[in-house]
Image (tube, grey):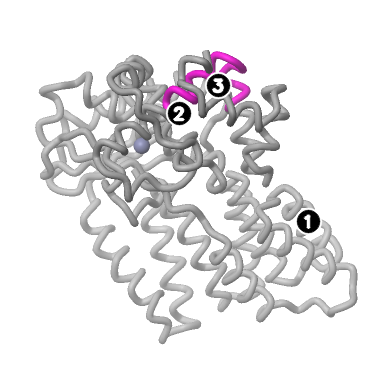
């Protein structure tokens, strides 16, 4: 599945909205700290950004733009509850701050709170009645609130299942059991636990198929939710479980580090945690000596041919298995958390794997066996 990363463009547009709403006086310590916060966000140094906004808010607690920045930093650090509080504060100070409304609604939506997201957009619309984006979002969410009127929640309250198509009351609890099991297995191994409730959308009118090796599935609409076509899926429960584990791993990685994770790490973890994922990858690589260059695995797999994509998934899984063997899963989890704080992969890797990143990359250009 293709990941949409929260890019520099998004940070810039929020920074722009914030500077229009800013009330701090240039030259004051609060202003300087706020500026440092936005600069850190642009460079992906999210932990530094959070610290800078906290300093700025201490000095000037009534500036909504600073709370917007603090909210964005918390969101990028994988802390949606803290982000929500910061954004609610921004909106209490400036109810017409549309950028804060949009980010808050997005966070609520990711946490399955469609009604809450709808309320935030409707409030925002009162201050910007001609904002075409807001009008479109409100319409979309109203339709979705109707569509998803029946839903299931897991016992552990970590997942919510929604249906696209008629509700399936046999399949939903089975899928939730599989996801709860995946939660304990994968989260415990990586020692990272997703904070928000994860939404799973089951497409009950679409034939079940393997979407895990198909970079085009749901391309362009990834929003932190797990989406799986499930018609007839119980005919092969093991395969359904494999697909759910794969997609859950993506959701977990995304919740820990919303941006900055190379695609090979995202996909490699998702395949490696599948039951028999490593065996699948080894089988694929044994079939042919062809390898994609490592650099090609860092970006989207979407443009790859079917054969190249299969290779890309298999190579990614082999690299991740080697990482898991070398440093343990918790070290990989620690790398993800460092990426969330704003470190590049190379820096985080060297900190937790006690190996030069260049040596690691060089070892990948050799046949994959040499990694072991
Ligand atoms: Zn995937």
Is residue 265 shown to the viewer in this render? yes
Q: Per the image, is 325 magenta?
A: yes
Residue designated by label 3: 323
Residue 336 falls left or right of residue 298: right
Whole-angstrom CA distance, mark 2 to mark 1, is 34 Å
Residue 244 falls left or right of residue 336: left
Residue designated by label 2: 269
Along the line of sight, the residue nearer the viewer: 266 or 93: 266
Q: Are marks 2 and 1 in contact (CB under 8 Å)?
A: no
Disc marking residue 54: 1
User: For residue 23, what is the image quadrant?
Assistant: bottom right
Where is 199 relative to 352, above or below?
below
Q: Say which label, 1 or 3, has the lower sequence index.
A: 1
Where is 335 relative to 73, above or below?
above
Residue 359 falls left or right of residue 136: right
Q: Which residues are magenta?
A: 317-332
**Farthest residue in the right direction?**
28
Indicate the position of residue 286 as horizontal and vertical percent values. Answer: 32, 17
Q: Say which label, 2 or 1, has the lower sequence index.
A: 1
Q: Say which label, 3 or 2, has the lower sequence index.
A: 2
């Amino acid at each position: 599945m293709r990941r949409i990363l929260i890019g520099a463009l998004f940070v810039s547009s929020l920074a722009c909205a914030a500077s229009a709403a800013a009330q701090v006086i240039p030259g004051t310590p609060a202003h300087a700290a706020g500026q440092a916060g936005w600069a850190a966000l642009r460079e992906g140094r999210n932990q530094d950004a959070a610290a800078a906004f906290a300093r700025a808010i201490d000095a000037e607690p009534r500036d909504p733009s600073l709370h917007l920045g603090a909210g964005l930093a918390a969101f990028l650090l994988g802390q949606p509850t803290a982000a929500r509080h910061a954004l609610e504060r921004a909106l209490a100070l400036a109810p017409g701050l549309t950028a804060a409304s949009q980010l808050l609604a997005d966070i609520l939506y990711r946490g399955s709170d469609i009604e809450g997201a709808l309320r935030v957009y409707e409030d925002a619309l009162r201050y910007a009645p001609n904002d075409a984006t807001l009008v479109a979002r409100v319409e979309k969410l109203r339709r979705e609130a109707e569509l998803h009127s029946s839903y299931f929640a897991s016992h552990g309250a970590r997942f919510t299942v929604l249906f696209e198509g008629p509700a399936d009351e046999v399949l939903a609890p089975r899928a939730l059991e599989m996801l709860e099991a995946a939660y304990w297995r994968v989260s415990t191994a990586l020692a990272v636990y997703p904070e928000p409730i994860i939404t799973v959308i089951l497409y009950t009118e679409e034939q079940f198929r393997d979407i895990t090796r198909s970079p085009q599935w749901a391309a362009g609409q990834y929003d932190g939710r797990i989406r799986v076509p499930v018609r007839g899926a119980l005919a092969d429960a093991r395969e359904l479980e494999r697909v759910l584990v794969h997609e859950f791993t993506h959701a977990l990685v995304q919740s820990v580090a919303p941006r900055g994770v190379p695609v090979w790490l995202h996909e490699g973890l998702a395949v490696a945690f599948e039951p028999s994922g490593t065996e699948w990858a080894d089988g694929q690589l044994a079939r042919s000596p062809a390898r994609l260059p490592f650099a090609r695995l860092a970006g989207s797999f979407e443009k790859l041919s079917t054969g190249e994509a299969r290779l890309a998934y298999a190579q990614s899984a082999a690299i991740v298995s080697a990482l898991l063997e070398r440093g343990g899963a918790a070290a990989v989890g620690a790398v993800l958390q460092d990426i969330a704080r704003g470190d590049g992969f190379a820096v985080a890797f060297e900190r937790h794997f006690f190996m030069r990143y260049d040596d690691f990359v060089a070892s990948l250009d050799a046949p994959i066996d040499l990694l072991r």
